[in-house]
Amino acid sequence: MIPEYLIPDPGKLPRPGDPEAADVFMRRWFETAARSDDPEIVKFAQEVADDDRGALLLNAIFGNSPFLGQCILADLSFTRRLFLSDPGPVFDEILAGIAGNGDASGATEERMRSLRIARRRVALTVGLADICGVWGLDKVTSALSHFAECALRATCAHLLAQASRTGELALPYPDDPQRESGLIILGMGKLGARELNYSSDIDLIILYEHDRIEYTGKASIQQFFVRFARGLARIMDERTQDGYVFRTDLRLRPDPGSTPPAISTIAAENYYESTGQNWERAAMIKARPVAGDIAAGERFLDHLRPFIWRKNLDFAAIQDIHSIKRQINAHRGGAEIALAGHNIKLGRGGIREIEFFAQTQQLIWGGREPGLRPRATFEALDGLVEMGRMDETVSADLKRAYEFLRRLEHRLQMIDDKQTHSLPETEAGLAAIAAFMAYDDREEFLADLLTEMRTVESHYAELFEESADLGESGNLVFTGADDDPDTLVTLREFGFRDPTMVSARIRAWHHGRYAAMRSARSRELLTELTPRIFDAMSRTIDPDAALLRFDGFLAALPAGVQLFSLFHSNPGLLDLVAEIMGSAPRLAEWLSRHPILLDGVLTQGFFEPLSDA
Protein backbone atom coordinates (compact mmCIF):
# COMPACT_ATOMS: atom_id res chain seq x y z
CA MET A 1 0.00 0.00 0.00
CA ILE A 2 2.53 2.63 1.15
CA PRO A 3 5.34 2.74 -1.44
CA GLU A 4 8.75 1.57 -0.28
CA TYR A 5 10.49 4.72 -1.48
CA LEU A 6 8.38 6.74 1.01
CA ILE A 7 9.57 4.60 3.94
CA PRO A 8 12.96 3.21 2.91
CA ASP A 9 13.62 1.76 6.39
CA PRO A 10 10.54 1.09 8.58
CA GLY A 11 12.85 0.29 11.50
CA LYS A 12 13.99 3.93 11.62
CA LEU A 13 10.48 5.38 12.00
CA PRO A 14 9.98 6.88 15.48
CA ARG A 15 7.83 4.95 17.89
CA PRO A 16 4.87 6.89 19.40
CA GLY A 17 6.01 8.98 22.36
CA ASP A 18 2.37 9.21 23.49
CA PRO A 19 0.59 5.90 22.66
CA GLU A 20 -2.72 7.16 24.08
CA ALA A 21 -2.70 10.15 21.74
CA ALA A 22 -1.91 7.79 18.85
CA ASP A 23 -5.00 5.71 19.72
CA VAL A 24 -7.23 8.81 19.90
CA PHE A 25 -5.98 10.08 16.54
CA MET A 26 -6.46 6.64 14.97
CA ARG A 27 -10.13 6.64 15.99
CA ARG A 28 -10.48 10.15 14.53
CA TRP A 29 -8.76 8.89 11.35
CA PHE A 30 -11.58 6.41 10.74
CA GLU A 31 -14.31 8.82 11.85
CA THR A 32 -13.09 11.59 9.52
CA ALA A 33 -12.84 9.16 6.59
CA ALA A 34 -16.35 7.84 7.30
CA ARG A 35 -17.76 11.38 7.02
CA SER A 36 -16.25 11.78 3.54
CA ASP A 37 -18.49 11.68 0.47
CA ASP A 38 -15.70 9.96 -1.46
CA PRO A 39 -15.71 6.14 -1.13
CA GLU A 40 -12.06 6.14 -2.24
CA ILE A 41 -11.14 8.04 0.94
CA VAL A 42 -12.92 5.44 3.12
CA LYS A 43 -11.14 2.63 1.29
CA PHE A 44 -7.78 4.44 1.56
CA ALA A 45 -8.14 4.96 5.32
CA GLN A 46 -8.76 1.28 5.94
CA GLU A 47 -5.99 0.11 3.61
CA VAL A 48 -3.39 2.37 5.23
CA ALA A 49 -4.34 1.16 8.72
CA ASP A 50 -4.15 -2.49 7.57
CA ASP A 51 -0.78 -1.98 5.85
CA ASP A 52 2.30 -2.66 8.02
CA ARG A 53 4.18 0.39 6.76
CA GLY A 54 1.04 2.52 6.87
CA ALA A 55 0.27 1.62 10.48
CA LEU A 56 3.85 2.39 11.54
CA LEU A 57 3.70 5.75 9.75
CA LEU A 58 0.35 6.78 11.30
CA ASN A 59 1.58 5.81 14.78
CA ALA A 60 4.85 7.72 14.27
CA ILE A 61 2.90 10.89 13.42
CA PHE A 62 -0.19 10.53 15.63
CA GLY A 63 1.86 9.52 18.68
CA ASN A 64 4.40 12.37 18.43
CA SER A 65 2.92 15.40 16.66
CA PRO A 66 -0.61 16.67 17.38
CA PHE A 67 0.01 19.40 14.79
CA LEU A 68 0.84 16.99 11.94
CA GLY A 69 -2.02 14.76 13.06
CA GLN A 70 -4.41 17.69 12.62
CA CYS A 71 -2.88 18.45 9.19
CA ILE A 72 -3.54 14.85 8.11
CA LEU A 73 -7.19 14.88 9.24
CA ALA A 74 -7.92 18.38 7.89
CA ASP A 75 -7.36 17.36 4.26
CA LEU A 76 -7.67 13.60 3.72
CA SER A 77 -7.76 13.90 -0.08
CA PHE A 78 -4.35 15.65 0.02
CA THR A 79 -3.11 13.11 2.60
CA ARG A 80 -4.06 10.30 0.20
CA ARG A 81 -2.13 11.97 -2.62
CA LEU A 82 0.90 12.46 -0.36
CA PHE A 83 0.93 8.95 1.15
CA LEU A 84 0.87 7.32 -2.28
CA SER A 85 3.49 9.56 -3.94
CA ASP A 86 7.03 10.84 -3.81
CA PRO A 87 7.06 14.01 -1.61
CA GLY A 88 9.17 15.90 -4.21
CA PRO A 89 6.55 16.15 -7.00
CA VAL A 90 3.81 16.86 -4.43
CA PHE A 91 5.85 19.75 -3.02
CA ASP A 92 6.49 21.10 -6.53
CA GLU A 93 2.74 21.05 -7.24
CA ILE A 94 2.04 23.12 -4.13
CA LEU A 95 4.58 25.75 -5.21
CA ALA A 96 3.21 25.74 -8.77
CA GLY A 97 -0.22 26.49 -7.33
CA ILE A 98 1.14 29.53 -5.49
CA ALA A 99 2.99 30.77 -8.59
CA GLY A 100 -0.15 30.27 -10.65
CA ASN A 101 -1.97 32.69 -8.37
CA GLY A 102 0.86 35.20 -8.60
CA ASP A 103 -0.86 37.35 -11.23
CA ALA A 104 -2.27 39.43 -8.35
CA SER A 105 -5.89 38.89 -9.29
CA GLY A 106 -8.52 38.16 -6.65
CA ALA A 107 -9.31 39.49 -3.23
CA THR A 108 -6.74 39.72 -0.46
CA GLU A 109 -8.78 37.42 1.82
CA GLU A 110 -8.90 34.70 -0.84
CA ARG A 111 -5.15 34.98 -1.35
CA MET A 112 -4.59 34.73 2.39
CA ARG A 113 -6.69 31.56 2.53
CA SER A 114 -4.92 29.88 -0.40
CA LEU A 115 -1.49 30.64 1.09
CA ARG A 116 -2.52 29.19 4.46
CA ILE A 117 -3.79 25.98 2.90
CA ALA A 118 -0.52 25.76 0.93
CA ARG A 119 1.45 26.28 4.13
CA ARG A 120 -0.43 23.47 5.92
CA ARG A 121 0.26 21.13 3.00
CA VAL A 122 3.93 22.10 2.88
CA ALA A 123 4.23 21.48 6.64
CA LEU A 124 2.79 17.98 6.23
CA THR A 125 4.85 17.18 3.11
CA VAL A 126 8.16 18.33 4.59
CA GLY A 127 7.38 16.78 7.98
CA LEU A 128 6.56 13.42 6.39
CA ALA A 129 9.71 13.46 4.21
CA ASP A 130 11.80 14.32 7.28
CA ILE A 131 10.28 11.72 9.62
CA CYS A 132 10.50 8.97 6.98
CA GLY A 133 14.14 9.79 6.25
CA VAL A 134 13.46 10.53 2.56
CA TRP A 135 14.90 14.06 2.82
CA GLY A 136 18.03 15.10 4.69
CA LEU A 137 18.50 18.37 6.58
CA ASP A 138 19.66 20.33 3.52
CA LYS A 139 16.58 19.34 1.49
CA VAL A 140 14.22 20.06 4.40
CA THR A 141 15.58 23.55 5.10
CA SER A 142 15.86 24.51 1.42
CA ALA A 143 12.26 23.36 0.78
CA LEU A 144 10.94 25.46 3.68
CA SER A 145 12.96 28.45 2.42
CA HIS A 146 11.74 27.96 -1.15
CA PHE A 147 8.13 27.96 -0.01
CA ALA A 148 8.70 31.17 1.98
CA GLU A 149 10.14 32.88 -1.10
CA CYS A 150 7.22 31.77 -3.29
CA ALA A 151 4.71 33.00 -0.72
CA LEU A 152 6.49 36.36 -0.42
CA ARG A 153 6.70 36.84 -4.18
CA ALA A 154 3.02 36.04 -4.67
CA THR A 155 2.12 38.48 -1.88
CA CYS A 156 4.34 41.26 -3.24
CA ALA A 157 2.91 40.81 -6.74
CA HIS A 158 -0.62 41.02 -5.33
CA LEU A 159 0.02 44.19 -3.30
CA LEU A 160 1.92 45.96 -6.09
CA ALA A 161 -0.77 45.17 -8.68
CA GLN A 162 -3.40 46.35 -6.22
CA ALA A 163 -1.55 49.66 -5.85
CA SER A 164 -1.31 49.95 -9.64
CA ARG A 165 -5.07 49.40 -10.05
CA THR A 166 -5.89 52.06 -7.44
CA GLY A 167 -3.57 54.59 -9.12
CA GLU A 168 -0.88 54.75 -6.43
CA LEU A 169 1.96 53.26 -8.49
CA ALA A 170 2.87 53.41 -12.16
CA LEU A 171 4.56 50.03 -12.66
CA PRO A 172 7.00 49.54 -15.57
CA TYR A 173 5.55 46.06 -16.21
CA PRO A 174 1.93 45.77 -14.94
CA ASP A 175 1.74 42.13 -16.07
CA ASP A 176 4.87 41.34 -14.01
CA PRO A 177 4.45 43.73 -11.05
CA GLN A 178 7.73 42.99 -9.26
CA ARG A 179 9.98 43.47 -12.29
CA GLU A 180 11.91 46.77 -12.00
CA SER A 181 9.43 47.88 -9.31
CA GLY A 182 12.15 49.32 -7.04
CA LEU A 183 10.77 47.28 -4.12
CA ILE A 184 13.40 45.21 -2.30
CA ILE A 185 12.61 42.38 0.12
CA LEU A 186 15.79 41.06 1.73
CA GLY A 187 15.62 37.69 3.44
CA MET A 188 17.86 37.70 6.50
CA GLY A 189 19.19 34.99 8.77
CA LYS A 190 18.08 31.47 7.98
CA LEU A 191 15.82 32.56 5.12
CA GLY A 192 18.72 34.35 3.43
CA ALA A 193 20.94 31.29 3.86
CA ARG A 194 18.14 28.93 2.72
CA GLU A 195 18.26 27.27 6.16
CA LEU A 196 14.77 27.96 7.54
CA ASN A 197 13.69 25.80 10.44
CA TYR A 198 10.40 23.95 10.60
CA SER A 199 8.31 26.56 12.42
CA SER A 200 10.46 29.59 11.73
CA ASP A 201 9.88 33.31 11.76
CA ILE A 202 11.08 34.98 8.59
CA ASP A 203 13.37 37.98 9.13
CA LEU A 204 12.91 40.59 6.40
CA ILE A 205 14.26 44.04 5.56
CA ILE A 206 11.91 46.02 3.30
CA LEU A 207 13.55 48.76 1.20
CA TYR A 208 12.62 50.88 -1.80
CA GLU A 209 14.64 52.77 -4.42
CA HIS A 210 13.17 56.25 -4.06
CA ASP A 211 14.44 57.60 -7.38
CA ARG A 212 13.29 54.63 -9.47
CA ILE A 213 9.68 54.46 -8.27
CA GLU A 214 6.94 56.45 -9.97
CA TYR A 215 4.56 57.12 -7.10
CA THR A 216 1.24 58.60 -8.25
CA GLY A 217 -0.78 58.46 -5.04
CA LYS A 218 -1.96 61.24 -2.72
CA ALA A 219 0.25 60.44 0.29
CA SER A 220 4.06 60.26 0.31
CA ILE A 221 6.15 57.42 -1.06
CA GLN A 222 7.36 56.72 2.51
CA GLN A 223 3.77 56.41 3.79
CA PHE A 224 2.86 54.12 0.89
CA PHE A 225 5.67 51.67 1.60
CA VAL A 226 4.95 51.69 5.34
CA ARG A 227 1.38 50.63 4.47
CA PHE A 228 2.82 48.08 2.04
CA ALA A 229 5.02 46.59 4.77
CA ARG A 230 2.09 46.31 7.16
CA GLY A 231 -0.06 44.75 4.43
CA LEU A 232 2.66 42.20 3.66
CA ALA A 233 3.03 41.31 7.34
CA ARG A 234 -0.75 40.96 7.72
CA ILE A 235 -1.07 38.59 4.76
CA MET A 236 1.82 36.47 5.98
CA ASP A 237 1.32 36.23 9.74
CA GLU A 238 -2.26 37.14 10.69
CA ARG A 239 -3.93 34.08 12.23
CA THR A 240 -7.26 33.12 10.64
CA GLN A 241 -9.36 29.96 10.87
CA ASP A 242 -6.98 28.52 8.26
CA GLY A 243 -3.88 29.29 10.35
CA TYR A 244 -0.99 31.52 9.26
CA VAL A 245 1.79 31.44 6.64
CA PHE A 246 4.92 32.76 8.41
CA ARG A 247 5.47 34.93 11.45
CA THR A 248 7.18 37.99 9.97
CA ASP A 249 9.87 39.95 11.80
CA LEU A 250 10.99 43.33 10.40
CA ARG A 251 13.30 44.28 13.30
CA LEU A 252 16.63 43.53 11.60
CA ARG A 253 16.34 46.77 9.60
CA PRO A 254 18.61 49.67 10.55
CA ASP A 255 17.79 50.91 14.09
CA PRO A 256 14.27 49.43 14.28
CA GLY A 257 13.41 51.43 17.40
CA SER A 258 13.44 54.72 15.49
CA THR A 259 12.82 53.83 11.82
CA PRO A 260 9.60 52.87 9.97
CA PRO A 261 9.08 49.26 8.80
CA ALA A 262 10.13 50.18 5.24
CA ILE A 263 12.95 52.63 4.46
CA SER A 264 14.70 53.94 1.37
CA THR A 265 17.93 52.38 0.14
CA ILE A 266 19.66 55.76 0.58
CA ALA A 267 18.68 55.92 4.28
CA ALA A 268 19.81 52.32 4.79
CA GLU A 269 23.17 52.90 3.08
CA ASN A 270 23.78 56.05 5.15
CA TYR A 271 23.03 54.14 8.35
CA TYR A 272 25.35 51.23 7.60
CA GLU A 273 28.18 53.53 6.48
CA SER A 274 27.94 55.76 9.57
CA THR A 275 26.56 53.62 12.40
CA GLY A 276 26.52 49.98 11.27
CA GLN A 277 27.78 47.55 13.91
CA ASN A 278 29.85 44.43 13.51
CA TRP A 279 26.93 42.17 14.47
CA GLU A 280 24.96 43.85 11.65
CA ARG A 281 27.83 43.07 9.28
CA ALA A 282 27.55 39.46 10.46
CA ALA A 283 23.79 39.53 9.81
CA MET A 284 24.28 40.97 6.31
CA ILE A 285 26.50 37.99 5.38
CA LYS A 286 23.29 35.96 4.98
CA ALA A 287 21.18 38.74 3.36
CA ARG A 288 19.62 37.76 0.01
CA PRO A 289 16.92 39.35 -2.19
CA VAL A 290 13.96 36.97 -1.93
CA ALA A 291 11.05 38.95 -3.44
CA GLY A 292 10.23 42.21 -5.19
CA ASP A 293 12.80 43.64 -7.60
CA ILE A 294 15.57 41.03 -7.33
CA ALA A 295 17.99 43.03 -9.52
CA ALA A 296 17.53 46.11 -7.30
CA GLY A 297 18.21 43.96 -4.24
CA GLU A 298 21.44 42.70 -5.76
CA ARG A 299 22.48 46.31 -6.53
CA PHE A 300 21.84 47.31 -2.91
CA LEU A 301 23.93 44.43 -1.53
CA ASP A 302 26.65 45.26 -4.04
CA HIS A 303 26.77 48.83 -2.67
CA LEU A 304 27.05 47.42 0.86
CA ARG A 305 29.94 45.10 0.01
CA PRO A 306 32.61 47.51 1.39
CA PHE A 307 30.65 47.71 4.68
CA ILE A 308 30.24 43.94 5.03
CA TRP A 309 33.62 42.82 3.70
CA ARG A 310 36.39 45.12 4.94
CA LYS A 311 39.79 44.42 3.45
CA ASN A 312 41.68 46.11 6.27
CA LEU A 313 40.67 45.82 9.92
CA ASP A 314 42.43 47.67 12.74
CA PHE A 315 43.01 46.11 16.15
CA ALA A 316 39.94 47.75 17.69
CA ALA A 317 37.64 46.44 14.94
CA ILE A 318 39.00 42.91 15.33
CA GLN A 319 38.50 43.16 19.10
CA ASP A 320 34.90 44.23 18.51
CA ILE A 321 34.33 41.22 16.23
CA HIS A 322 35.82 39.06 18.98
CA SER A 323 33.29 40.62 21.35
CA ILE A 324 30.39 39.12 19.35
CA LYS A 325 31.71 35.79 20.57
CA ARG A 326 33.01 37.00 23.91
CA GLN A 327 29.64 38.31 25.06
CA ILE A 328 28.60 34.67 25.38
CA ASN A 329 30.05 33.20 28.54
CA ALA A 330 32.00 30.27 27.02
CA HIS A 331 32.70 27.92 29.91
CA ARG A 332 35.77 25.81 29.37
CA GLY A 333 34.48 22.58 30.92
CA GLY A 334 33.64 22.01 34.55
CA ALA A 335 29.99 23.00 34.88
CA GLU A 336 27.33 20.56 33.72
CA ILE A 337 24.82 21.46 31.01
CA ALA A 338 21.35 21.03 32.54
CA LEU A 339 19.45 19.30 29.74
CA ALA A 340 15.87 19.69 30.99
CA GLY A 341 14.58 22.97 29.54
CA HIS A 342 17.89 23.70 27.76
CA ASN A 343 17.68 26.04 24.76
CA ILE A 344 19.43 24.16 21.95
CA LYS A 345 19.62 27.29 19.79
CA LEU A 346 20.82 29.99 22.19
CA GLY A 347 22.11 27.92 25.10
CA ARG A 348 25.62 26.58 25.73
CA GLY A 349 26.81 24.23 23.01
CA GLY A 350 23.89 25.26 20.81
CA ILE A 351 23.20 26.18 17.19
CA ARG A 352 24.10 29.86 17.66
CA GLU A 353 27.64 29.01 18.75
CA ILE A 354 28.21 27.03 15.53
CA GLU A 355 26.86 29.91 13.42
CA PHE A 356 28.93 32.51 15.30
CA PHE A 357 32.01 30.29 14.98
CA ALA A 358 31.75 30.65 11.20
CA GLN A 359 30.49 34.23 10.98
CA THR A 360 33.06 35.89 13.22
CA GLN A 361 35.89 34.39 11.17
CA GLN A 362 34.12 35.30 7.94
CA LEU A 363 34.06 38.94 9.11
CA ILE A 364 37.79 38.94 9.85
CA TRP A 365 39.05 37.10 6.78
CA GLY A 366 36.29 37.48 4.19
CA GLY A 367 37.36 40.96 3.09
CA ARG A 368 40.59 39.55 1.66
CA GLU A 369 39.38 36.05 0.78
CA PRO A 370 36.15 35.98 -1.30
CA GLY A 371 35.97 32.22 -0.81
CA LEU A 372 34.86 32.90 2.77
CA ARG A 373 31.67 34.76 1.82
CA PRO A 374 28.99 32.05 1.35
CA ARG A 375 25.70 32.48 3.19
CA ALA A 376 25.12 28.84 4.20
CA THR A 377 26.75 27.57 7.41
CA PHE A 378 28.22 24.36 5.94
CA GLU A 379 29.64 26.22 2.94
CA ALA A 380 31.22 28.77 5.29
CA LEU A 381 32.84 25.99 7.34
CA ASP A 382 34.09 24.34 4.13
CA GLY A 383 35.57 27.67 3.02
CA LEU A 384 37.39 28.12 6.33
CA VAL A 385 38.94 24.65 5.96
CA GLU A 386 39.88 25.29 2.33
CA MET A 387 41.56 28.60 3.22
CA GLY A 388 43.46 27.00 6.09
CA ARG A 389 41.55 28.94 8.76
CA MET A 390 40.06 25.86 10.43
CA ASP A 391 41.11 22.28 11.06
CA GLU A 392 39.11 19.75 9.05
CA THR A 393 38.28 17.67 12.14
CA VAL A 394 36.81 20.77 13.84
CA SER A 395 34.64 21.43 10.78
CA ALA A 396 33.46 17.79 10.73
CA ASP A 397 32.61 17.94 14.45
CA LEU A 398 30.61 21.16 14.05
CA LYS A 399 28.75 19.87 10.99
CA ARG A 400 27.76 16.65 12.76
CA ALA A 401 26.55 18.59 15.81
CA TYR A 402 24.71 21.10 13.62
CA GLU A 403 22.80 18.35 11.81
CA PHE A 404 21.88 16.66 15.10
CA LEU A 405 20.74 19.90 16.76
CA ARG A 406 18.80 21.15 13.73
CA ARG A 407 17.00 17.79 13.41
CA LEU A 408 16.12 17.96 17.10
CA GLU A 409 14.98 21.59 16.68
CA HIS A 410 12.63 20.49 13.89
CA ARG A 411 11.16 17.67 16.01
CA LEU A 412 10.52 20.08 18.89
CA GLN A 413 8.71 22.46 16.52
CA MET A 414 6.72 19.71 14.76
CA ILE A 415 4.97 18.74 17.99
CA ASP A 416 2.67 21.79 18.19
CA ASP A 417 3.93 24.06 15.40
CA LYS A 418 5.57 26.39 17.92
CA GLN A 419 8.71 28.45 17.38
CA THR A 420 10.47 26.78 20.29
CA HIS A 421 14.08 25.74 20.79
CA SER A 422 13.86 24.48 24.36
CA LEU A 423 13.87 20.88 25.52
CA PRO A 424 10.96 19.69 27.70
CA GLU A 425 11.47 20.25 31.42
CA THR A 426 9.91 16.99 32.62
CA GLU A 427 11.22 13.43 32.45
CA ALA A 428 8.12 12.36 30.53
CA GLY A 429 8.62 15.18 28.04
CA LEU A 430 12.27 14.23 27.50
CA ALA A 431 11.25 10.59 27.00
CA ALA A 432 8.67 11.68 24.40
CA ILE A 433 11.15 13.77 22.38
CA ALA A 434 13.66 10.89 22.57
CA ALA A 435 11.00 8.65 20.99
CA PHE A 436 10.32 11.26 18.28
CA MET A 437 14.07 11.29 17.55
CA ALA A 438 13.78 7.51 16.98
CA TYR A 439 15.72 6.55 20.13
CA ASP A 440 14.79 3.45 22.10
CA ASP A 441 15.28 5.15 25.45
CA ARG A 442 15.70 8.60 26.93
CA GLU A 443 19.15 8.07 28.44
CA GLU A 444 20.74 7.10 25.12
CA PHE A 445 19.27 10.20 23.46
CA LEU A 446 20.41 12.54 26.26
CA ALA A 447 23.92 11.04 26.20
CA ASP A 448 24.24 11.68 22.44
CA LEU A 449 22.84 15.20 22.81
CA LEU A 450 25.24 16.03 25.64
CA THR A 451 28.19 14.72 23.60
CA GLU A 452 27.31 16.98 20.65
CA MET A 453 26.77 20.08 22.81
CA ARG A 454 30.01 19.57 24.71
CA THR A 455 31.84 19.22 21.39
CA VAL A 456 30.40 22.55 20.18
CA GLU A 457 31.11 24.21 23.52
CA SER A 458 34.73 23.01 23.50
CA HIS A 459 35.48 24.24 19.97
CA TYR A 460 33.64 27.52 20.56
CA ALA A 461 35.56 28.18 23.78
CA GLU A 462 38.86 27.82 21.87
CA LEU A 463 37.82 30.43 19.31
CA PHE A 464 39.75 33.67 20.06
CA GLU A 465 41.01 31.90 23.17
CA GLU A 466 43.39 34.77 23.92
CA SER A 467 40.38 37.09 24.46
CA ALA A 468 38.82 36.93 27.92
CA ASP A 469 35.07 36.46 28.13
CA LEU A 470 33.17 39.69 28.73
CA GLY A 471 30.35 37.93 30.54
CA GLU A 472 32.21 36.60 33.57
CA SER A 473 28.93 36.05 35.42
CA GLY A 474 26.98 34.87 32.38
CA ASN A 475 25.89 36.01 28.93
CA LEU A 476 25.86 39.72 28.09
CA VAL A 477 24.61 39.61 24.50
CA PHE A 478 23.03 42.74 22.99
CA THR A 479 23.14 41.87 19.29
CA GLY A 480 20.09 41.28 17.12
CA ALA A 481 16.51 42.35 17.73
CA ASP A 482 15.49 39.83 20.41
CA ASP A 483 16.51 39.67 24.04
CA ASP A 484 18.93 36.84 24.74
CA PRO A 485 17.27 34.68 27.46
CA ASP A 486 20.52 33.98 29.31
CA THR A 487 21.40 37.68 29.25
CA LEU A 488 18.11 38.53 31.00
CA VAL A 489 19.03 35.97 33.69
CA THR A 490 22.48 37.59 34.07
CA LEU A 491 20.91 41.05 34.41
CA ARG A 492 18.58 39.80 37.14
CA GLU A 493 21.59 38.38 38.95
CA PHE A 494 23.15 41.87 38.79
CA GLY A 495 20.07 43.11 40.69
CA PHE A 496 18.05 44.75 37.89
CA ARG A 497 14.28 44.42 38.39
CA ASP A 498 13.48 45.10 34.72
CA PRO A 499 16.14 43.33 32.63
CA THR A 500 14.11 43.78 29.42
CA MET A 501 14.31 47.57 29.83
CA VAL A 502 18.05 47.36 30.50
CA SER A 503 18.64 45.19 27.42
CA ALA A 504 16.65 47.64 25.25
CA ARG A 505 18.70 50.62 26.54
CA ILE A 506 22.01 48.91 25.80
CA ARG A 507 20.89 48.01 22.27
CA ALA A 508 19.84 51.64 21.73
CA TRP A 509 23.35 52.76 22.75
CA HIS A 510 24.85 50.43 20.16
CA HIS A 511 22.53 51.75 17.46
CA GLY A 512 24.26 55.14 17.85
CA ARG A 513 21.15 57.13 18.76
CA TYR A 514 23.18 59.41 21.06
CA ALA A 515 25.98 61.68 19.88
CA ALA A 516 28.36 59.94 22.30
CA MET A 517 27.79 56.64 20.47
CA ARG A 518 28.09 57.83 16.88
CA SER A 519 31.70 56.71 16.35
CA ALA A 520 32.60 53.06 15.91
CA ARG A 521 35.42 53.46 18.45
CA SER A 522 33.04 54.67 21.18
CA ARG A 523 30.77 51.66 20.63
CA GLU A 524 33.76 49.29 20.71
CA LEU A 525 34.87 50.80 24.04
CA LEU A 526 31.31 50.55 25.30
CA THR A 527 31.18 46.81 24.58
CA GLU A 528 34.27 46.33 26.74
CA LEU A 529 32.84 48.56 29.50
CA THR A 530 29.36 47.05 29.69
CA PRO A 531 30.13 44.39 32.36
CA ARG A 532 31.86 47.04 34.52
CA ILE A 533 28.88 49.38 34.12
CA PHE A 534 26.49 46.67 35.31
CA ASP A 535 28.80 45.76 38.20
CA ALA A 536 29.01 49.40 39.31
CA MET A 537 25.24 49.96 38.99
CA SER A 538 24.49 46.72 40.87
CA ARG A 539 26.17 48.13 43.99
CA THR A 540 23.82 51.12 44.13
CA ILE A 541 20.54 51.35 46.09
CA ASP A 542 18.41 51.10 42.93
CA PRO A 543 20.28 49.66 39.90
CA ASP A 544 17.35 50.27 37.50
CA ALA A 545 17.05 53.96 38.43
CA ALA A 546 20.84 54.34 38.37
CA LEU A 547 21.05 52.93 34.85
CA LEU A 548 18.24 55.19 33.61
CA ARG A 549 20.03 58.27 34.99
CA PHE A 550 23.29 57.06 33.46
CA ASP A 551 21.40 56.72 30.15
CA GLY A 552 20.31 60.36 30.48
CA PHE A 553 23.91 61.32 31.26
CA LEU A 554 25.14 59.59 28.07
CA ALA A 555 22.37 61.21 26.01
CA ALA A 556 23.67 64.66 26.96
CA LEU A 557 27.30 63.97 26.08
CA PRO A 558 28.63 65.55 22.86
CA ALA A 559 31.13 62.68 22.38
CA GLY A 560 31.98 59.41 24.07
CA VAL A 561 35.47 58.16 23.20
CA GLN A 562 37.29 60.38 25.71
CA LEU A 563 34.96 59.58 28.60
CA PHE A 564 34.86 55.83 27.91
CA SER A 565 38.66 55.82 27.71
CA LEU A 566 38.72 57.58 31.09
CA PHE A 567 36.45 54.92 32.56
CA HIS A 568 38.80 52.25 31.18
CA SER A 569 41.91 53.78 32.70
CA ASN A 570 40.23 54.97 35.94
CA PRO A 571 37.77 52.28 37.10
CA GLY A 572 37.14 54.23 40.32
CA LEU A 573 35.67 57.07 38.26
CA LEU A 574 32.93 54.79 36.89
CA ASP A 575 32.17 53.64 40.47
CA LEU A 576 31.81 57.27 41.56
CA VAL A 577 29.50 58.11 38.64
CA ALA A 578 27.39 55.01 39.42
CA GLU A 579 27.11 56.06 43.07
CA ILE A 580 25.95 59.52 42.02
CA MET A 581 23.42 58.08 39.56
CA GLY A 582 22.05 55.65 42.14
CA SER A 583 22.02 57.83 45.27
CA ALA A 584 21.94 61.52 44.29
CA PRO A 585 19.29 62.27 41.65
CA ARG A 586 19.78 66.07 41.71
CA LEU A 587 23.56 65.74 41.47
CA ALA A 588 23.09 63.23 38.63
CA GLU A 589 20.95 65.75 36.75
CA TRP A 590 23.57 68.48 37.32
CA LEU A 591 26.34 66.19 36.09
CA SER A 592 24.32 65.40 32.93
CA ARG A 593 24.20 69.13 32.19
CA HIS A 594 27.88 69.71 33.07
CA PRO A 595 29.89 66.52 32.36
CA ILE A 596 33.12 68.59 32.39
CA LEU A 597 32.86 68.47 36.21
CA LEU A 598 34.29 64.94 35.97
CA ASP A 599 37.66 66.49 35.07
CA GLY A 600 37.91 67.77 38.66
CA VAL A 601 37.68 64.25 39.99
CA LEU A 602 40.90 63.38 38.16
CA THR A 603 42.94 66.12 39.84
CA GLN A 604 45.52 65.03 42.39
CA GLY A 605 44.18 64.97 45.94
CA PHE A 606 40.46 65.09 45.00
CA PHE A 607 39.59 62.20 47.33
CA GLU A 608 41.77 63.45 50.24
CA PRO A 609 40.04 65.00 53.29
CA LEU A 610 39.35 68.72 53.02
CA SER A 611 41.69 70.99 54.96
CA ASP A 612 40.33 72.88 58.00
CA ALA A 613 39.42 76.55 57.93
Image (cartoon, rainbow, N blue to C red):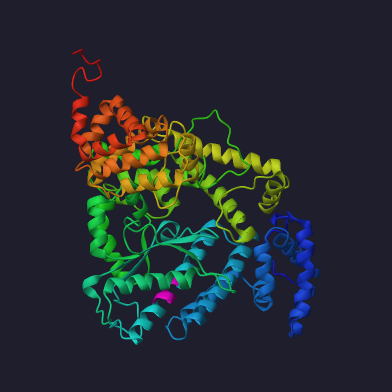
Range covered by the magenta-colored residues: 152-156
376 drawn magenta: no
Residue 422 or residue 411, whichever sits in front? 422
Q: Quadrant of the N terminus?
A: bottom right
- Report the side of 479 relative to 519 (left or right): right
Note whether residue 387 is visible: no
Residue 42 vs residue 333: left or right? Answer: right
Q: Quadrant of residue 547?
A: top left
Give 244 or 554, whichever is nearer the viewer.
554
Q: Does residue 164 appear left or right of residue 393 in this picture?
A: left
Residue 449 in view, yes or no: yes
**Magenta segment includes 155:** yes
Main SS of residues in magenta:
helix
Q: Is residue 41 above or below residue 502?
A: below
Which quarter of the picture shows residue 231?
Answer: bottom left
| Residue 497 horizontal/vertical position (percent) | 47, 41
